[in-house]
Amino acid sequence: MSGNTFGAIFWTDGKRDAPMLPDLPWLVKCPHCQSLIWIDEQEEVGEIEPYIDSGIYKDAKSYNEPELQDYFAELKISNLGRKKERYLRRRAWWKGNDKRRGANIKQNLSDEERENLQALDKMLDPSNDNDRIMNAEIKRELGQFEDAEAILQEPFVDDFSQAISILKELIQRGESFVAEMKFDN
């Protein structure tokens, strides 16, 4: 199997909606019992060839995507490692923003969403350019425009010039909601 990002939509919070590149989540919801399941903790019972209907697992159902509250509930588990916690916080951010995408719905962050962003912000590595972009976006979505702009003023090793320009424009307009990032080709 292969994929590509043709026709993909990129968002300021880092989410990518790519119809030709499916998301492979680490945490899913069982379609039968609604339990949350970490993919890497499951025992493989078999394998099928993609796009070939062998009928072997004909009663198998696809996983469900966790809801925002599922992510928040999973975050309350005390023995999560840093990698899983960061994954959950980012997915919760995206899931909360899903209701704000595209339709110009201006729904403020809930207290739980704000707390999640503040906790994710503390997990980011200031020496990593990707994390710094995420840090600036978190600050922007929290309405901390001066802090977000200060982060974007520092030099970046990687070429994030278009993303930085888009974020700076949103900051200048005082917009704190997730937005589509339209890049020049």
Image (cartoon, helix red, strand yellow):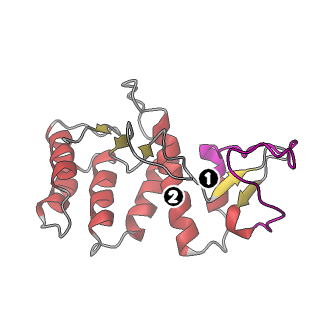
Q: Are marks 1 and 2 in contact (CB under 8 Å)?
A: yes
Quarter of the picture containing the C terminus is: top left
Callout 1 environment at 10 Å: few (<14), some (14 to 19), or many (20+)?
many
- The residue range painted magenta reads 42-70
Q: Which residue is mark 2?
A: 89
Q: At which x and y percent is residue 25?
A: 60, 55
Quick check: is 30 in the magenta stretch?
no
Q: Which residue is mark 1?
A: 71
Tell me: 142 left or right of 109.
Answer: left
| Image spot of residue 9 (x, y percent) | 37, 38
- Camera-side residue: 115 or 87? 87
Whether residue 110 can be seen here? no
Q: Position of residue 87 (x, y in %)?
A: 53, 62
Kind of residue at badge 2: Arg
Q: Is residue 65 magenta?
A: yes
Residue drawn 28% across the image and 72% down it: 126
